Amino acid sequence: MEPGIIGTRLASAVIGPLIKKLFVTEGGGAGLVDRPVRISGHVSFRGEKRSLTDSDLHGLAAKLVKQALRTGERPVTADEERAVIDALANTLYALGDVTMTDMDAVRLGSADFAGELRKAAGRPEKHLTADATHFYERLLEAACVHVLQFFTQRSTFVAHALVQQTRGLAELTAKVDELIRRDPLPGAEDTAFEQLYLPYVARKHAKLTIYGIDLGNSPTRWPLDAAYLSLEATSLPPGRPLG
């Protein structure tokens, strides 16, 4: 069974409320912590805020499997179905063991996040047949799509994402500035040279000599643009000497 087919059968209207039960509800003042909280701190089947029992978690996994099997060709036998439910329940239970935050999980994407959960759960698919393993992996990945979507809809996620984005931009700007300082951009040396050379040229050529007339001691300085003269050749009247 392809992931797209499983995702269609696990409609958001059905799977959304089931996935939501895996996590505690945000209370007042949510998002005021200094840094994102690990996923294990949000689950509803661990810790002081526990509201979901192990039996409830197993029943939730069973509902997900039943929903995926509700129509069409059956990808696993009845005996394999029970094994898939157990494997899925154990994998979902690993949400309380992973050390990453919800932001880390969203960055990974559903496929890689599902892989991290399988690893944290001790790879329960090793006890399944090939067909059951394929069904379990596709089902888990489809469930992880909804888990990550649930994360992104939490107010704490939005607040932390904005903070992380701001910090990331500040760090990137600082690194770029330091890189430019250590290794100037092409042409930067030319610009620096021009800034030093232009005052030298102004000092060196701030005098004008025309036909032996030295204006270097003139009480006023001659700007460079005054040195450009317009010379026009004209003919002298007959009999008039030069000079």
Image (cartoon, helix red, strand yellow):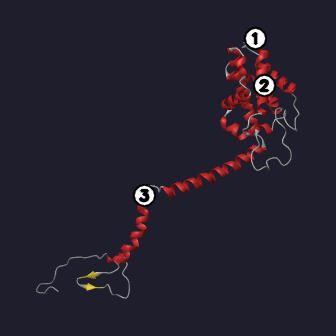
Residue marked by disc 3: 187
Residue 22 x/y as whole percent: 82, 32
- Say which residue appears at 55% left-offset and 53% top-offset: 176
Query: Is residue 183 positioned above or below 48 on the image?
Result: below
- Say which residue appears at 76% left-offset and 50% top-offset: 34
Residue marked by disc 2: 90
Query: Is residue 38 positioned above or below 68 on the image?
Result: below
Mark 2, Cα crowd under 10 Å, few <14 / some 14-19 / many 20+, is many
Q: Given the image, on which type of amino acid does mark 2 rest?
A: Asn
**SS at circle 1:** loop
Is tag 2's residue or tag 1's residue first in the polypeptide sequence?
Answer: 1
Residue 198 x/y as whole percent: 39, 71
Is tag 1's residue or tag 3's residue first in the polypeptide sequence?
Answer: 1
CB atoms of marks 2 and 1 within 8 Å: no
Which of the numbered marks, if any, corresponds to residue 77? 1
Q: Calculate the distance from the C-alpha at mark 2 to the C-alpha at mark 1.
A: 20 Å
CB atoms of marks 1 and 3 within 8 Å: no
Q: Given the image, on which type of amino acid does mark 3 rest?
A: Gly
- Say which residue appears at 73% left-offset and 37% top-offset: 99
Specify whether 2 is left or right of 25.
Answer: left
Q: Looking at the image, how many numbered discs can be counted on the residues?
A: 3
Which one is nearer the viewer's eye here, 185 or 228?
185
**SS at circle 2:** helix
Is tag 2's residue or tag 3's residue first in the polypeptide sequence?
Answer: 2
Specify whether 191 is left or right of 228.
Answer: right
Mark 3, Cα crowd under 10 Å, few <14 / some 14-19 / many 20+, is few
Q: Calculate the distance from the C-alpha at mark 1 to the C-alpha at mark 3.
A: 70 Å
- Say which residue appears at 54% left-offset and 56% top-offset: 178
Q: Given the image, on which type of amino acid does mark 1 rest?
A: Thr
- The answer to which image quadrant residue 27 occupies is top right
- The answer to which image quadrant residue 107 occupies is top right
